[in-house]
Amino acid sequence: SVRLGRMLTSSYLAVSRYDAFGDTGIGATRAWAKGYSPRAENAISYTSPSFSGFKFGGEYGFGEKKDARDVRYFGLAGTYDNGPLSLGLGYDRANNGHGGAAVTANDISTWQLGGAYNFGVVKVLGFYKDSKTKPAAGGKATGKFKTFGLGLTAPVGAAGEVKVAYNNYRDSAAATTKKADQLSLGYVHNLSKRTALYGTYAYLKNNKKNGLGLELNGAMPGAGLSNSGAQHGLQAGIRHAF
């Protein structure tokens, strides 16, 4: 298939699926929250058919100005899905401000990979992501953002599912390394094929001395972090698919 426009990239889709919370809600990982945009603009994308479980794809996103390199994007990804085993690998290269003001005038390149195995009684998921930024005008890398996540999902009875995830974040710039850790616990109860109740608790702790300043996904504006760099979140709701 070939697509044109603004879209989620193949690299992001190949690896974000190994977040136990689906990169959605307060329990989701913050791996793609710092200087990384999961979407490419002005893009042309290709996705291959499946070859015995293997698929590959990629995008090229054009800049906003003629003969300019601003916000141009290039990415590739490959996936493998066969029975209980699932794997994903992706690479991104984005120029000069891709992803918002936080990385303006910086280029960012990212390698990421993930995998999952379903044992039936429990599904194990994990991913690793490594991003590097450097000045668009040239020079050495100015920062590295490394993160990994581990998760478990397990069926409970005929209608329930428990989710557990741990995420670790490390941001290195010059001689300073900033750190944060996150733990998320969740439960989903399916009332029918289309309707489910869910509840999630999440705890995010930034290193007090060299904290990243990360906040939980979807945290209410103004909730902020405590003086210790920590934040607790509780979320409950009902989901219906039309």
Image (cartoon, rainbow, N blue to C red):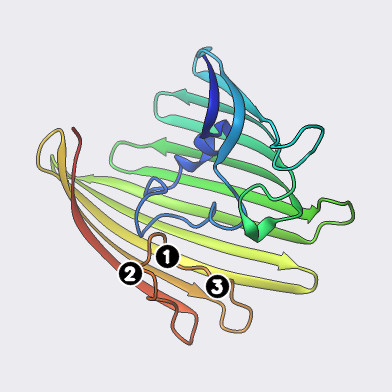
Query: Tags 2 and 3 in contact by the CB under 8 Å rule?
Result: no
Where does the image place residue 220, in percent across and percent down from the top left? Answer: 35, 68
Residue displayed at 37% across by 76% down: 223
> Which residue lies under the disc numbered 2?
233
Where does the image place residue 212, in percent across and percent down from the top left? Answer: 59, 71
Report helix, strand or loop for mark 3. Answer: loop
Q: Quadrant of residue 174?
A: bottom right
Q: CA distance from mark 2 to mark 3?
A: 15 Å
Disc sitting over residue 213 in the figure: 3
Disc sitting over residue 216 in the figure: 1
Report helix, strand or loop for mark 2. Answer: strand
* 228 relative to 129, above or below: below
Amino acid bearing label 2: Gly
Extreme residue in the right direction: 139
Q: CA distance from mark 1 to mark 2?
A: 7 Å
* 88 relative to 49, above or below: below
Report helix, strand or loop for mark 1. Answer: loop
Query: Tags 1 and 2 in contact by the CB under 8 Å rule?
Result: yes
Amino acid bearing label 1: Leu
Q: Quadrant of residue 103?
A: bottom right
